[in-house]
Image: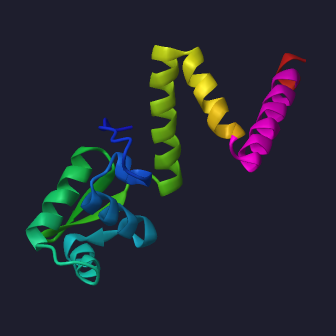
Amino acid sequence: MAKFDLDPDKRGLNKVLGDLENEVMEILWSGSPATVHDVHRRLLERREVAYTTVMTVMARLAEKGLLQRQKEGYSYRYQPVCSRHEYTRSLVGSVLEGLVRDFGSPVVQQLLDRVEEDEGLMEELERLIERRRADDARDVR
């Protein structure tokens, strides 16, 4: 996965993507592939933004490894390298891997403290742990 900067004060994928980057990715995740022209037209329905700004953002997203592009005539057609779900899962995995590697037990304790605040998450965690233990037991046999 691509390198990223994390802003913990922002919400959702805006923690790692700028506002416009996030909007571009959401457009492409909802109906890719698309040209800069296609994405620009969709963005204009919501906000004023220059065509060249959209072109630059999409080129940077390709450089970051989030989009792939294919030349079509005089323009490029872009599409996401992975789905929103795959990107989110990879992003969360990368963040947790780094935190656990560097801080270990305090990360697990903080995660548990947050999960305990939400009964649904606690039940989901219990189910996941049970499933993992069952899978591990099958692998040992």
User: Looking at this view, is 97 or 31 the one in front?
Assistant: 97
Q: Residue at x 21, y 70 (%)?
A: 36
Q: Quadrant of the C terminus?
A: top right
Furthest residue toward bottom:
45
Answer whether residue 73 is visible to the viewer in this image: yes
Residue 86, position in %: x, y? 51, 49
Q: Is residue 10 left or right of residue 20?
A: right
Residue 53, position in %: x, y? 12, 65
- Compared with 88, 97 (above or below) is above
- The boundaries of the magenta stretch are 117-137
Q: Is residue 35 left or right of residue 124?
A: left
Answer whether residue 83 is visible to the viewer in this image: no
- Compared with 16, 56 (above or below) is below
Q: Quadrant of the N terminus?
A: top left
Residue 51, position in %: x, y? 12, 73
Q: Residue at x 26, y 76 (%)?
A: 43
Q: Is residue 135 left or right of residue 79?
A: right
Residue 118 falls inside the magenta stretch: yes
Residue 135, position in %: x, y? 82, 29
Q: Residue at x 25, y 51 (%)?
A: 62
Q: Count numbered badges in the picture.
A: 0
Residue 22 falls inside the magenta stretch: no
